[in-house]
Every structure is written in C-alpha cells, then in structure tokens.
Amino acid sequence: MKKTILLLCVLCLGAALQEMKGQTATFKALFLYNFTKNIEWPSGSNGSDLVITILGDDEISTELEKIAKVKKAGNKSIKVVSARSVKDVGDSHIVFLGSSKSSLMKSLSYAHQNNPVLLVADKDGLCKQGAAISFLTVGGKLRYQISPQTIEAHNLKVTQKIISLGIKVQ
C-alpha cells in the first residue's frame, strides 16, 4: 500500500513538473513574439515574413507555431524554422538557442556577427558570449538579461520598454 501511494505521488509530481515545463515554453514563446514588436530591423533585412529560427528546443518551436497561426509581427507573417546545427541556421530575424545547445553560442554569435539578427539564448549568462537576450529565472519568475550594445552591434533598434523590463548587462 505504501509503495502504491509513493508511486502515485511520484507520478503526480512528474505530471506537475511536465505541465510547468510546458508553461515555461509558452511564456518564452510569448516573450519571443513580444520581442518582434519591440525590435526594429534595418530596411534591407525585410522580407515578406519575419523568420524565427529555433535551434535545440522543439517545445518552443511548437509554442511559437501556435502563436504564428494567429498573430503577426506588424504586417508580416511569422515563419518558424527549426535548425539542428549552427550551419543550418539561414537568414533569420531572430535565432533562439535552446539550453541543450548553449555550448554553440560563441560559434552562433561568430557566424552571425555581421547580420541584423537578434540572438536569444535560453541560459543565464550567455549575453557574455554574444547573445543579445538571455532567459533566466529569478525568484521563480521568468526574466531575461539584455545587452543593448549587442543589439546595436547587429544594427537593430530596441525599444526602451524591452530594455527596462530586462536585466541590463554589458
């Protein structure tokens, strides 16, 4: 009887953790969508779609695809693309690097150093390795670090609203 109760508790806890993980993916996808409304790309980088490439996080990709079906980035449709490696990342407006691929941040940053692309990472501290924005959890809440210098270096303009809501890093 005790083993059965313990097993049920473990299963319930596992289910609760899975649901929390899914909610976190939803929140991160919503943050990415909101970044599209608060970042300005140079006119030469415009296309018919706003392209968001996801490297290493299928859950974020799934959540963003749900958003892309019903929302637009200004007057542009949102196109979500999945990549498996840095060399698979094509022309994109935003590249999201999942935490499982965080070791690729330096090479991703190097590969796109002259491109007007917003590099967003899913691991604390990656702004020091070239990410413009990096997610982290503070006091149980999802937050982000932001490097306005990195954003400007990629020839992008960011609203003060996005800067003020984040944790500014150099």
Image (spheres, grey):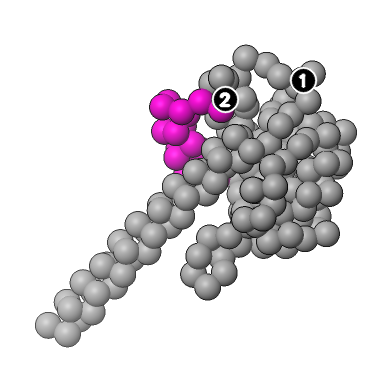
Image coordinates of residue 52 in percent, x first then y, are 61, 32
- Marking on residue 84: none
- Which SS does the magenta portion mostly show? helix
In the foreground, 113 or 55: 113
Sequence-wise, the earlier of marks 1 and 2 is: 1
Instruction: Place residue 123 in its image quadrant.
Output: bottom right
Q: Amino acid at mark 2?
A: Gly
Element type at mark 2? loop
Image coordinates of residue 18 in percent, x first then y, are 37, 58
In this picture, residue 66 sits left or right of residue 165: left
The local crowd at label 2, few if under 14, some if 14 to 19, many if 20 or more residues have their Cα within 10 Å, is few
Name the residue tied to disc 1.
43
Give, as a single range, the part of the protein colored magenta.
57-73
Is 75 placed above or below 117 here? Answer: above
Q: What is the CA distance from the residue labelled 1 to the residue labelled 2?
A: 14 Å
Residue 154 within the segment the image draws in magenta: no
Query: Is residue 59 at all visible to an observer of this figure?
Result: yes
- Residue that protrudes farthest toward the front in the picture: 160
Residue displayed at 79% across by 18% down: 44
Name the residue tied to disc 2.
74
Residue displayed at 78% across by 49% down: 148
